[in-house]
Amino acid sequence: MMKPICRFIDFETGKIGSNAKITKRYLSDLEGVFRDIDALRSMFNRDILVYEVHEIVVPERAGEITHGTSIIYPGKVGDEYFMTKGHFHVRAGGEVYLCLKGEGYILMEEKGGRSSYSKMIPGSLVYVPPLWAHRTINMGTKEFTCFYAFPSEVGHDYESIEKKGFSKLFLERDGKPVIENAHRDHQDSFLG
Ligand code: ZN
């Protein structure tokens, strides 16, 4: 049986007290995520930390809620902003994201191709419905940190995204952030 847990999130660093499980994703872990492969490989010699996840580990069974923080560092690969790999949940289960620091976007996409994205600043609260893939992107100049929570039993499917990618690109053009279609035939909704 789990006991009640009380922890403290430092909003500045995104770190959660002690005993959080920390996963770090470096550029070399993210081949296939960014479109400019040459730019990605040219940066490997400095193998830069792109994002980290601090998670409160609970058993993966019905009724439990996995929760933690994701911290995406500022940066780009070529003209594409640093972002998470993104995933579907294997089983139906939604997820909540609350921005704590910085600014960025959350991109959500159904298997059928419909996508939706929303700008996030501290206080932005986003509900990702079940069966929507999701990724977060740092389009700011400091860390982009979110708190997240989802049903622990849902499981993660990274492979579908690795194969097909998302339909939107988050790029810098002439010093300004822009969002472009990666390919055609997608219905979109911008949440503001
Ligand atoms: Zn998720």
Image (cartoon, rainbow, N blue to C red):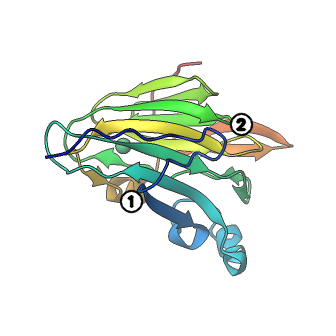
Q: Which residue is mark 2?
A: 178
- Mark nearer the N terminus (1 vs 2): 1
x and y percentages locating residue 107 in the rendered image: 50, 36
Which of the image's four quarters has the C terminus? top right
Residue 185 visible? The answer is no
Q: Is residue 139 above or below residue 52?
A: above
x and y percentages locating residue 79 in the rendered image: 74, 53
Q: Residue at x 64, y 53 (%)?
A: 82
Q: Amino acid at mark 1?
A: Lys
Query: Is residue 137 left or right of 62 when viewed as pictured?
Result: right
In terms of image quarters, where does ligand 1 lie?
A: top left
Could you say whether the residue bearing mark 2 is in a helix, strand or loop?
strand
Q: Residue at x 45, y 27 (%)?
A: 187
Query: Is residue 45 left or right of 167 when viewed as pictured?
Result: right
Q: Which residue is mark 1?
A: 163
Q: Amino acid at mark 2?
A: Val
Query: Is residue 72 left or right of 39 when viewed as pictured?
Result: left
Q: CA distance from mark 1 to mark 2?
A: 24 Å
